[in-house]
Image: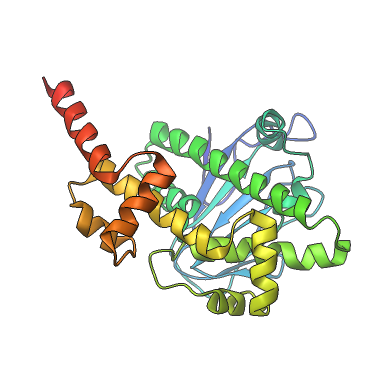
Amino acid sequence: MPLLNNTSFAGVDATAPCSPLNCIWLGAVARPLRLPQLGHIYLLFPGETAVSCNNSTLHPNQYSLFTAQTEALTLEPIAPDASPTLLLLLSPGFILEMAHFLNIPDSLNHLLHSISLPQGDELSFLLAELVTVCTPPAQQNTAEELMLEVVGEVLRLMQLRQQALRTLAHHKQSTIDDLLPRLLQARQYVEARYLQPIKVAGVAEVVALSEFHFARLFKAAFDMSLHQFVMRLRLDEAHRCLLTTDVSVTELGLHVGYSSLSSFIHAFKRRFGFSPAHYQRQLKMSRIEQAG
């Protein structure tokens, strides 16, 4: 997988309508930069300053995908800055092959194109890690492993969009084009802030929808209420913490927003099939066996 240089896209040669290559470009956008039209899906992760792509501004706390393969794309700096911008060039053939396996349709443009998403979710964490490992001296093997994880997250986003599209199918196309980006932005917004106090009204305001309209659409699109989504994210965080730390169950419950220990234990067991204390004991036994 090529790591492209700062002044050109050397090594990306189109021998067919779409390039078979997945590539990574990391550099400062100091001047307008025309992207090669080789059929790639572009994943843009700005540095510490905003950049523009075809009049769509991305701020440092956002990222976006661009999939309109017939549209010429140009990156432009908003203000002079030396911080690096990360650009992933994903081969659509590679993505589509994996999407077909998951029964995701070919409508990549409608599912992914030019939706500004807030950083703070799993995908943006992977992209930030890619910036680190691609900064010279680049760690090629680690970059390739992270790239596969990024593709997995892109496929997850495609599944979410397809799920939302199915539930919104009875709306006019113009309504879908307006609502789908807002619902996806809301979901990403929550994924980036789920340990903070989150209210339906606050998220609805972020995506410029009424509280009632947003709550109804979110539940219809993702088959769960906003509250259920937040609770699931918090319980998943608790599960991760048990894997990586020795935090007590009481402290863990408080960490993920439960003031009642019994409520936390009940919710955790309902989601995973076992109590946090039981899971913690099993992990300790497993570590002892591995050490011995």
Q: Nearer the viewer, residue 264 or 210?
A: 264
Query: Residue 183's quadrant in the figure?
Result: bottom right
Farthest right residue? 172
Residue at left 16%, top 22%? 289
Q: Is residue 53 visible?
A: no
Residue 172 spot, x, y in % from top left: 88, 63
Looking at the rendering, which quadrant does residue 274 occupy? top left
Is any part of residue 162 visible from this angle? yes
Across the whole image, how many numbered discs are drawn on residues?
A: 0
- Horizontal side of residue 8 vs 40, given as left or right: left
Name the residue located 29 percent from the left edge and 67 percent from the top edge.
Answer: 259
* Nearer to us in this view, 191 or 232: 232
Q: How is the image coloured?
A: rainbow
Percent x, y for residue 113? 72, 55
Residue 33, quarter of the rendered image: bottom right
Q: Quadrant of the C terminus?
A: top left
Measuring 53% from the left and 66% from the top, which residue is drawn there? Answer: 189
Instruction: Work out which residue is located at the far left of the displayed protein and give it.
Output: 292
Q: Position of residue 186 (x, y in %)?
A: 59, 66
At which x and y percent is residue 121? 47, 56
Q: Is residue 178 above or below residue 133?
A: below
